[in-house]
Amino acid sequence: MGEKTTLTLHDVTDTLGEDDELYAEALQIAGTVFEEVEALFGDENYESRAGWFKDESNDEGDVVFAKDTPHGRMVTISTELPMPTEDVIRETWDGVETLPQWNQNINFASRIAAPTPNFDIVTYG
């Protein structure tokens, strides 16, 4: 039996089971991306959007800012949702399949696998 793949972020550790080791590379990539995004959002210029450009906005106050990075174009959306934060987080995590119902830019979305309670493999387009 080989070594199990684990990832720890903010004192939460995910460990892949033997049958889920095929997702080991995806788990490691997810960890790397999480750290990169966290560093980006923690950057002193993020709040002022220095280095970002306004990509879109609407009359409801939603604003999309974009920034070109070595990995491609990254966007951040500022909006107000009329619900408690806990509901937004729950919908973001559990509602992958409903994305096409409320996001006109997404035609399909599904969860392929859930190797750990904190790590899902999803597809959308």
Image: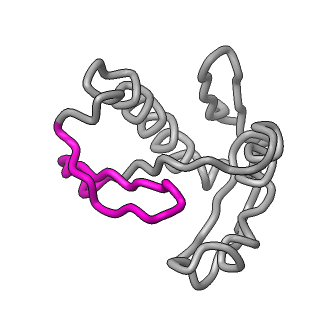
For the magenta stretch, what is the residue range? Answer: 51-74
**In the image shown, does 98 or 112 lie closer to the viewer?**
98
**In the image shown, does 45 or 112 lie closer to the viewer?**
45
Q: Give the residue displayed 73% in from the left and 40% down from the top.
A: 118
**In the image shown, does 87 or 16 lie closer to the viewer?**
87
Residue 48 part of the magenta-drawn span = no
Q: Give the residue displayed 27% in from the left and 35% down from the top.
A: 49
- 7 lies above or below 71: above
Quadrant holding the N terminus: top right
Q: Is residue 77 left or right of residue 40?
A: right
The majority secondary structure of the magenta stretch comes to: strand
Would residue 18 be visible to someone looking at this image?
Answer: no
Q: Give the residue displayed 23% in from the left and 49% down from the top.
A: 67
Q: Is residue 2 left or right of residue 40?
A: right
Q: Give the residue displayed 37% in from the left and 33% down from the top.
A: 36
Q: How is the image coloured?
A: one colour
Measuring from the top left, give residue 27's x and y in whole percent: 56, 43
- 100 lies above or below 10: below
